Amino acid sequence: MKFTLSWLKDHLETEATLGEIVDTLTMIGLEVESVDDKSALKPFVIAKVLTAEKHPDADKLKVLTVDAGDGKPVQVVCGAPNARAGLIGAFAAPGTYIPGIDTTLSVGKIRGVESHGMMCSERELQLSDEHTGIIDLAEDAPVGTSFAEWAKLDDPIIEIGLTPNRPDCTGVYGIARDLAAAGLGRLKDGTVEPVSGSGACPVDVRIEAPDLCHGFALRAVRGVRNGPSPKWMQQRLIAIGLRPINALVDITNYVTFDRGRPLHVFDAAKVTGDLTVRRAKEDETVLALDEREYRLSPEVCVIADENSVESIAGIMGGEHSGCSAETTDVLIESALWEPTNIARTGRDLGIITDARYRFERGVDPEFMVGGMELATRLVLEICGGEATEARVVGYQGHTPKTVSFPPAEVKRLTGLDVPPEESLAILSRLGFAPQGAGETVEVAVPSWRPDVDGKADLVEEVMRIHGVSEIAPGPMISHDAVSGRILTTLQVRTRQAKRALAARGMMEAVTWSFIPADHAKLFGGGQRALTLANPIAADMSTMRPSLLPGLVTAAQRNADRGFADVALFEVSGAYEGDSPEGQRRVAAGIRRGTARLEGEGRHWAGNAAPVGVFEAKADALAVLETGGAPVDKLQIEAGGPDWYHPGRSGTIKLGPKIVLGTFGEFHPKTLEALDVSGPLCGFEVFIDAIPEPKARATRTKPRLDLSPFQAVKRDFAFVVDRAVEAGTLTRAAASADKKLISDVSVFDVFAGAALGPDKKSIAIEVTIQPVERTLTDEDFEAVAGRIVENVGKQTGGVLRS
């Protein structure tokens, strides 16, 4: 919300300085985002051209002698066609910054002639887009004085950041009310005297959608002259970033920002018959004032005449009935629209206007007629004409809310010790109406404060006007132990998964939660319930069932730009259904090319091998281990979902039913469907499926016990059926003696005709770690015997001879 200092003083009688106003605005919750004190225009002075001679080496240039009021005429080279002797304009001396061309002047030579400054155009001072000539002032303009001060361009501009709960401050008058309540001056009377009209309004209004329109005021003004608006109004609109158009449009914009009351003016000659407020018909269209055609739906409220839609209610008028220079008769409309409908319509149509901004927050219902009266007065003063009587339809009046307010709540909720009488006085200055006295006071809420619903809201009003700075700082009271847990298990595991994958050389990516429908179907999704009703793009139409499509396509984009060896991961949500239970927390990652943990690319000592299923498996197990999953108890089954290669993928389970993750190389058909290439492997771990760890009696880590005895390694080679998995064999060997066997690893797998049909040899290395004493040969032989026996029972394997 922008406004100028002089505009504020139209409603606030104050002697406060700009600095005091800015500080007070921020203190009372209307945070000042920027202040333009117009210091950039201070160096420009009014100067007179004494002589204007033709440049000796340029036909379109003139050499001027300029008097800036100091009695020392200077030479200026100028190319403006209106430069002449006797002209009075705005002069900039060397060293002045010219905002319109982003240049700081210096003494220079133009075609061999020195120039000591510049006579400026309006565009160079950012006053307008006019650049056909230099500024030409009246003959009585005082030479040597400040141009900005004389032209009243030194009016500071203040911009505040409004929170959505303060619709009353979308107008300058509401801001002045708050400042007056804070003791910074006296609020001037904002009452608008009704205009006495002549005759009834010739256009009637019918409201067919009373749930969308709570009131409608209309008045006709005949015989207007629609020219430019007054200079003072144009300057204020330009200052807040609006472009002056014509008097009628500028008046509605002015009232919108002055009182927070959006209006609309129709060209009466272009309106056929009476007006109807109704829901739009399916696929009905309207050409709006922004010259765009909008297709409407029954959810949109419109103002229509007997022929067509003339306005998108509360948001934007139609081009057909807009006012032009030929307009002589107008209809001034002021209405009350349902805020939620305005917000939805604006969002659906993608229209952002000053009217929508105010209506969706809630305007003052009691100023509906007053806003029309104010606009009528301005039209009569600026454009002339004769007004009819006002027609008001559908407005039932405003019933104030009443809130029970115990003044003692101010102390309890804020810590401020504010006397009850001062609290009630503050509320009264803000327009509230306290009634009665005692421990609880009934307070009537004014019509312009729809955000106030309870006693806490009134406490906030007292606090911000009395002064947030008056609250004494103090330490926060701790209600829990310092070591109390803050994050949930899922939050902790999410962080741990990210750290683990980053430590494995992978880079975190953030991909869209929306993917193309064909990609979703490829990865087991694409259900109707997960299709977006209003996607932001055609290729982002479905909630992702997996994180892998986004990561795979991201890797391909990197490869297309010359970064073929990438390892990406993401820990986020995937969607199996439209219920809360259907959202999964997933850690996923992909590796492309030669992006292995050990290194990537070419090297003289040996090139890195392409990534494969085992890289994906190692990444998945790293996530599970850091998340607290019992890695030693996991089962890995061959094969995974359809998007993986059937012979180079696996599924990680805990028991027969709990699936903790999948991994593998991608199926060639999957890569073809995604239009990607290259060696690619990936994994997904379902973090929310990892079981909660058992509660421990203490958070202290267990003691680290290191054996003083030398570990011994023994190798075993077993012949087993081809269907036996190596993991099954290693678990069987490890369980032979859980106290002494500290590690089992596979170092060779061999299959050949010498072993027999459908047989293979798996060689393992077993680490035996003595704990209590040095083991003898007999002890080792006993452990070896138990290993052979256990492997034989669980896998059917026999020692290879």
Image (cartoon, rainbow, N blue to C red):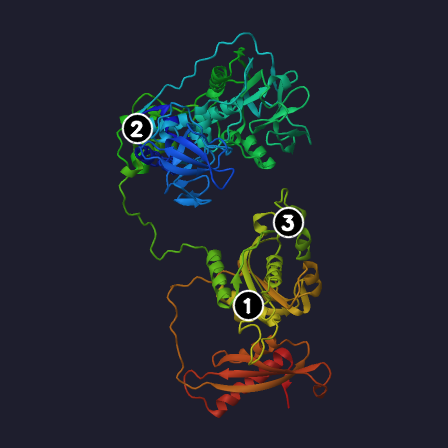
The residue under label 2 is 184
Q: Nearer the viewer, residue 28 or 772?
A: 28
Tags 3 and 1 touching, CB below 8 Å: no
Quadrant housing residue 274: top right
Q: Is residue 61 left or right of residue 188?
A: right
270 shown above or below 418: above
Q: Is residue 736 left or right of residue 757?
A: left
Query: Is tag 2's residue or tag 3's residue first in the polypeptide sequence?
Result: 2
Q: Residue at x 70, y 59 (%)?
A: 673
Q: Which circle, 2 or 3, is nearer the viewer?
A: 2
**Alpha carbon distance from label 3 to label 1:** 28 Å
The x, y position of residue 219, in whole percent, is: 55, 15
The residue under label 3 is 542
- Disc 2 secondary structure class: loop
The x, y position of residue 726, in whole percent, is: 61, 77
Q: Is residue 164 visible?
A: no
Q: Residue furthest bottom?
A: 777
**Alpha carbon distance from label 2 to label 3:** 55 Å
The disc label shown at residue 55, or none: none
The residue under label 1 is 619
Q: Is residue 66 visible?
A: yes
The x, y position of residue 350, in whole percent, is: 58, 37
- Disc 3 secondary structure class: strand
Q: Is residue 781 left or right of residue 576?
A: left
The x, y position of residue 107, in whole percent, is: 39, 44
Q: Amino acid at mark 3?
A: Thr
Q: Nearer the viewer, residue 318 or 403?
A: 318
Q: Amino acid at mark 2?
A: Leu
